Image (cartoon, rainbow, N blue to C red):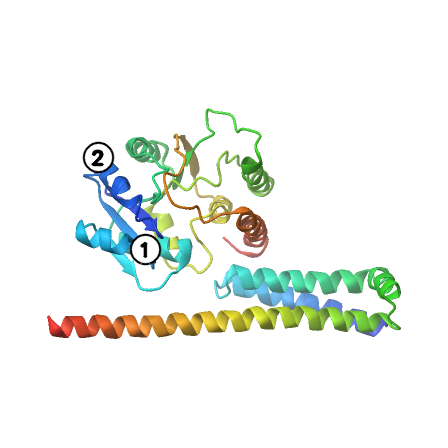
């Protein structure tokens, strides 16, 4: 793992922290989302501060390069996020549909009274 | 009592309990928040002419309770009491909690099981101990029963919680308000086991809840300003 990549990751992690902190202070971000991004950047931060850890894991799994493991971890976490997001979008669409239907039905009841 | 107290009862599928709960608090101001129940809760409320707000979709405890807070704010209540719809909480302690809040000038009064009594060493109380410990670590205040669902909030706190995205009626909010130098006091109450129906926290649910609460306390303490 090259020094450039480590520095880039560390900078990106601190950037994420500062951004999340600002959003939390502005009450613009839900706690669940904030927790995900904080854990995400913590994992990257630990891996770039202590490259021995990913190097050891990469060696045990049989990866040629440590960087591959870093990329794999990032892709894996983002795919999990994507899955939960698409679940949430379906849920939101369903709620929106129910809400619209509910308002429309109530409207109709009021008219008929 | 000269100050107006609103009892907020979030109810999700509490058809078996809700009548008993409302009967027990007869004569007091209350509002039931029916949180998109799939059972008969809404019908029972309608038939008995209870004061209730019918949410068309399920929002969860935080969203449902917040609805009650907005109602309290609009109708100019001095205090809002969080009260379970499952018959766990006992109304004879309400007056005590309110006068205690007025005397002590407290912003939040927690109906606590462990002010005078000792906390038992059971698996269920492990989570409670963990949260107490975390809150003590950050705020140096002792909250014996952070997970108690019977809490009294004054107007200042109601106004803050009614519109905030991250302040639900949970231990993390207590810990946040302690950080904001709000006065949080505990009042000894007793609680019953829930009477019928199923609690929304099973084992994996409890683990998730604890994880979320611990993270949330940490994030609110470290990242959020006063």
Q: Nearer the viewer, residue A74 or B155?
A: A74
Q: Which residue is under mark 1?
A: B39
Residue B88, above or below A58:
above
- Measuring from the top left, give residue A3's x and y in whole percent: 85, 71
The numbered mark 1 sits on a residue in which chain? B
Q: Nearer the viewer, residue A97 or B154?
A: A97
Label 1 to label 2: alpha-carbon separation:
36 Å
Residue at image point 37% right, 73% down: A96
Residue at image point 28% right, 33% down: B95
- Whether residue B75 is visible to the viewer of this picture, yes or no, is no
Residue at image point 85% right, 65% down: A61
- Whether residue B188 is visible to the viewer of this picture, yes or no, is yes
Residue B135 circle label: none
Q: Which residue is under mark 2?
A: B1
Disc 1, SS: loop
Circle 1 crowding by C-alpha within 10 Å: few under 14, some 14–19, many from 20: few
Residue B102, above or below B180:
above
Q: Nearer the viewer, residue B4 or A85?
A: A85
């Amino acid at each position: 793992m090259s020094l450039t990549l480590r520095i880039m990751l560390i900078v990106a992690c601190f950037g994420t922290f500062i951004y999340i902190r600002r959003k939390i202070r502005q009450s613009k971000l839900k706690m669940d989302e904030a927790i995900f991004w904080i854990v995400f950047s913590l994992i990257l931060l630990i891996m770039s501060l202590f490259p021995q850890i990913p190097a050891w894991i990469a060696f045990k799994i049989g990866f040629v390069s440590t960087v591959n493991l870093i990329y794999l971890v990032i892709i894996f976490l983002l795919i999990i996020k994507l899955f939960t997001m698409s679940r949430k979008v379906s849920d939101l669409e369903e709620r929106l549909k129910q809400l619209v239907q509910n308002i429309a039905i109530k409207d109709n009841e009021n008219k008929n009274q | 009592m000269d100050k107006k107290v609103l009892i907020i009862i979030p109810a999700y599928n509490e058809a078996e309990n809700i009548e008993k709960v409302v009967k027990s608090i007869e004569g007091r101001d209350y509002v039931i928040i029916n949180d998109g129940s799939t059972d008969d809760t809404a019908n029972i409320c309608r038939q008995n002419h209870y004061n209730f707000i019918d949410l068309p979709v399920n929002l969860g405890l935080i969203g449902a309770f917040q609805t009650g807070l907005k109602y309290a704010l609009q109708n100019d209540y001095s205090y809002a009491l969080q009260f379970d719809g499952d018959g766990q909480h006992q109304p004879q302690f309400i007056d005590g909690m309110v006068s205690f809040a007025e005397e002590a000038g407290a912003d939040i009064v927690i109906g606590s099981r462990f002010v005078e009594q000792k906390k038992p060493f059971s698996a269920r109380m492990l989570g409670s101990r963990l949260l107490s410990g975390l809150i003590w670590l950050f705020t140096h205040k002792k909250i014996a029963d952070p997970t108690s669902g019977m809490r009294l909030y004054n107007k200042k706190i109601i106004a803050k919680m009614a519109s905030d995205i991250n302040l639900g009626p949970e231990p993390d909010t207590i810990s946040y308000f302690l950080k904001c130098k709000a006065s949080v006091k505990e009042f000894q109450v007793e609680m019953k086991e829930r009477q019928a129906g199923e609690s929304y926290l099973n084992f994996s649910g409890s683990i998730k809840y604890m994880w979320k609460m611990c993270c949330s306390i940490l994030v609110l303490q470290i990242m959020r300003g006063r």
